Image (cartoon, rainbow, N blue to C red):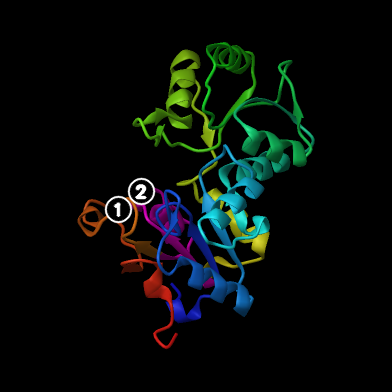
Amino acid sequence: MAERSEIECWLTDMDGVLVHENDAIPGAAELLARWEDAGIPYLVLTNNSIFTARDLSARLRASGLHVPEHRIWTSALATADFLSQQVPGGSAFVIGEAGILTALHDAGFIMTESDPDFVVVGETRNYSFEAITKAIRLIDAGARFIVTNPDATGPSAEGPLPATGAIAALITKATGREPYVVGKPNPMMFRSALNKIGAHSKRTGMIGDRMDTDIVAGIEAGLHTVLVLTGISDRAEIEKYPFRPDEVVGSVADLLPEDR
């Protein structure tokens, strides 16, 4: 495994690493600027499939972080990339919002309720019983079941909201069919990100805040893994897992050169 000094490309999670809610985490803006100025290939990864890369770039800009949309890789984009390799120009019935719908459209997919190749479940704020019923019937009829990401809940000001993983579990219970999940912790999302920036796993680092998604997927993809303690996982949680990140740091500020 490469040492940090040997890393030529970076993948980084977004929430809990670069931003917390709507605020930039100290050191994030400077780290991103250093990567840009040095011409270091990087991507910001997120399991969020609601928003397009343009939406997320604007959100980050409002937090004081400059991340061009071509530097953002979502589970929606990874899903579209994967499906376009499986069935180029295929068709899909989609439960989701602009992120996954735009990604599939741009990949040449046709959205249809009539005999689709795939049923794709992404994240949305408005899960419809009618749409879920349609998905169940299409899967029973032979459509392949794809899920953008496994997150069971998402945050809101009022408390947790049911998310993609929870709806996928409902559909699985009704159909007896397990989905193929593209987003983290599936290392495929990291491999597709590496392909996008022409990076090699042996010279790429992954910065994340979750042991159960970012770090395990990074390890399985053969990356140099860095856990930051500004998000979900703390030092005590590390001991619960049989694997370890290559590095544990307080925040992304600790990845900046000491002579800055």
- Say which of 252 and 106 sits in front: 252
Label 2 packing within 10 angstroms: few (<14), some (14-19), many (20+): some
Distance, label 2 to label 1, CA atoms, is 9 Å
Q: Residue at x 56, y 44 (%)?
A: 75
Residue 34 against residue 224 in the figure, above or below: below
Residue 93 position within the rendered picture, expressed as x and y whole percent measured from the top left = 67, 23
Residue range of the region highlighted in magenta in the rendering: 203-225
Question: Circle 1 sits in a helix, a strand or a loop, which is it?
Answer: loop
Q: Secondary structure at mark 2?
A: helix
Residue 212: image tag:
2
Quadrant including the N terminus: bottom left
> What residue is rendered at 58% in x and 49% in y?
56
Residue shown at the point (54%, 29%) measured from the top left: 124
Is residue 16 in view from this perspective? yes
Name the residue beneath numbered marker 1: 233
Which residue does the image show at 40% across and 29% down from the upper left? 161
Front residue of 108 and 156:
156
Which of the two discs, 2 and 1, sits closer to the camera?
1
Q: Are marks 2 and 1 in contact (CB under 8 Å)?
A: yes
Looking at the image, residue 102 sits to the left or right of residue 253; the answer is right
Label 1 sits on what residue type?
Answer: Ser
The amino acid on which the numbered mark 2 sits, given as a three-letter code, is Asp
Q: Earlier in the sequence, mark 2 or mark 1?
A: 2
The answer to if 45 sits in the magenta stretch is no
